[in-house]
Amino acid sequence: MSIRSKRKEEHLALAQKFFAEPRQNSFDQMHLVRPSLPESKVDPAAIKTTMFGKELATPFFINAMTGGSRKSYKINQSLGRITAKTSIALALGSASILIKEHEQLESFLVAREENPTGVIIANCNAKTTPQDAQKIVSELQADALQIHLNTVQEIAMPEGERDFRYLDNLRRLRQKITVPIIIKEVGFGLDQATINLLKNEEFTLFDIAGSGGTNFAQIENARNQSDVSYLEDLGLPTVISAMMARKENVDFIVSGGVRNPLDAFKGLCLGGKYVGISNVFLQALMQNGEDYLLQMIKNWQNELAALLAIFGQADLQSVTLIKQYFDLPLKNLIEQLI
C-alpha cells in the first residue's frame, strides 16, 4: 500500500475513533420559532430540488469522504448504490491521489458506475493543475468539482503542504474547468473575507464546512509525532460561517457538524442552497452496513419533509423567513463577527 493510500485508510479509522467524542456544535445554540397552527401538510415533493441541472429528492447530500484505497472502494461502491436509490447527490473524497497513483481510479469511479445518472461531485486540492483537475472531472464523469482549502489540516499533517499560495491557480482552474466549481473548506469554516475575495474572482458556489463535525486537525494530530492539538480550536462555527456567506449574497452549501434532519433544516433556514453530511453517514455505513444507511437516509427525507410542515412552510424557498434566535454565547459571536 502506498503512503497516500495508507493515509486515506488512517483517516477513515481516525474519523471513526473520534466520532463519538462530544464537541461544541453551533446548531445547538440556534433555535427556530414554530407556529402552533402551521396550516400545512407533509409533502415529500416539497423538498425536491435541482443540482447542476439534475432533479434530486432532497437538498441534503453525502459530502466528500474518501477514495484512493481498498477500503474506500467498498465505501464508494455502497454510497453510489445508496444515492442512486434515494436520489441524492454524492461528493467523493479528494481525487488528487490519481495524479501520482492513477491505478486508484476505480476506487472513485465505482460510485459513478453504481449511480450512472445521478449527481456525482469530484474533489481535488487547490494546487491541482487545471489539466489534472479537468482529467479528474472527465474520468469520474463528475457534474461539479469541489476544490478544497485545508491549510489547517496541511499544517497538522506530518507530510502536509507548506505553500498556501493558491489564488493564481484557482484563477486558472476557474478558466479551464468545464463543470461548476465549489470552493470548499474542510471543517474550519470559510470566513467572509475569503468568500468576498473569491466572489470577486467570479467563483459562485461555496461549501462553508464549519466547525462542529469532523476535526481534521485532531485527525492529523493523531498521526503526528509532535503535539499540534492547539490547532483544533481554530475553526469558525458552522452557523457563523453560513451567516457570513449569506451576507455576501452568494450561493452556498452548509456543512460541518450536521447530525440530524433538524440540523439540516437549520442549515436551509440560514440560507444554504444545499446541506452536506459526511461522517454521520459514513459511520452509519461502516458500523451498521449499507441497508442501515439506506433506511437512515430515507428516514431523513421523510423527517425533513415533516419539519417543513411543522414550521408551516409549503416549499424550501420560504424557510429563510422563519424567525431565529440564539443562545447568548453564539449571539455574542454574531454581534462581533457578522
Image (cartoon, rainbow, N blue to C red):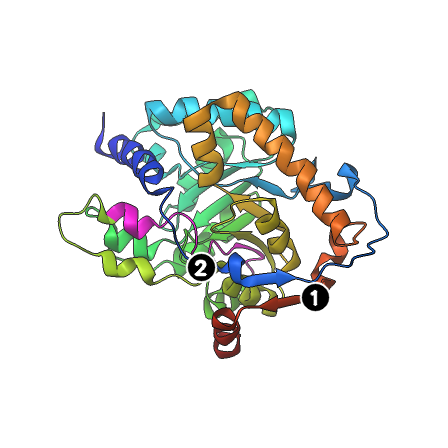
**Which mark is drawn over residue 186?**
none
- Read off the magenta span: 202-220
Q: Which residue is mark 1?
A: 323
Name the amino acid, label 2: Gly
User: In the image, residue 98 lies at what x, y percent?
Assistant: 35, 32
Name the amino acid, label 1: Lys
Q: Secondary structure at mark 1?
A: loop
User: In the image, residue 240 lies at what x, y percent?
Assistant: 51, 65
Marks 2 and 1, the one that precedes in the sequence: 2
Within the magenta stretch, is there residue 4?
no
Horizontally, residue 251 falls left or right of residue 121, namely right
User: In the image, residue 185 lies at what x, y percent?
Assistant: 43, 54
Within the magenta stretch, is there residue 216?
yes
Q: In terms of image quadrants, where is residue 59?
A: top right
Q: Which residue is mark 2?
A: 189
Instruction: State whether residue 220 appears in this view.
Output: yes
Question: Tag 1: Cα neighbours inside 10 Å, few (<14), some, or many (≥20)?
Answer: few
Rendered residue at 55%/53% (across/down): 254
User: In the image, residue 120 lies at what x, y percent?
Assistant: 55, 34
Rendered residue at 47%/31% (across/down): 284
